[in-house]
Image: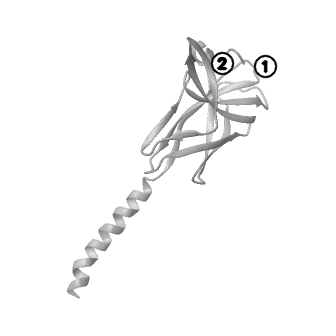
Amino acid sequence: MKLLARTLPLIIVTTLSSHFAIADDKLEIDDAWIAEAPPVSKVMAAYMEIENETRQDRQATSMQCKEFERAEFHRTVDKDGMARMEHQQVLNIPANSELELEPGGYHIMLFNPARPLKAGDKTDCSMKFDDGTTINFDLEIRKSSVEDHSHHHHH
């Protein structure tokens, strides 16, 4: 009985602490948006923050959006003073870190919208990860600025 009295608090603390560790062990997508484009635009760019609150590196392996034919991961790089996009097979998100997708850096190219999207509209999307996780989220269309499109003019 004394052994149980001594070990029970330890069992309870261990159980609770592992529960809280699991509760924080997640992937999350925040502030997902698309810059509004002219109605005839066949390509749009999406930006967001992908948070990896797990203890292991994760990779985003694919993305789909209800309003678009396909989505591709890209990164804008500067080569000899010229900005160009490089297709990325996956997006790497280090453990306990975040990846910011933003104009001039990593972003998602969305091709062939089903309809013209205006500021205030939202579209359903999902992103798949290497560990089998799928995150469903909304992309919000926001008013565009010159900076949002400056590295996509060649499309």
Taking depth in this image into account, of 22 and 143 the one nearest to the observer is 22
Residue type for callout 1:
Val
Question: Which of the 4 image quadrants contains residue 6?
Answer: bottom left
- Residue at 43 percent across and 51 percent down: it is 55
Taking depth in this image into account, of 142 and 7 the one nearest to the observer is 7
Q: Position of residue 44 (x, y in %)?
A: 69, 25
- What is the crowding at mark 2: few (fewer than 14 residues within 10 Å), some, or many (at least 20)? some
Viewed as shown, does residue 124 lie left or right of 147?
A: right
Up-down relation of residue 49 to residue 136 (above or below): above
Residue type for callout 2:
His
| Camera sees residue 68 | no
Q: Which residue is mark 1?
A: 40
Viewed as shown, does residue 151 lie left or right of 56?
A: right
Query: What element does badge 2 sit on?
Result: loop
Q: Position of residue 20 (x, y in %)?
A: 38, 59
- Residue at 45 percent across and 53 percent down: it is 25
Q: Which residue is mark 2?
A: 152
Location of the N terminus by quadrant is: bottom left
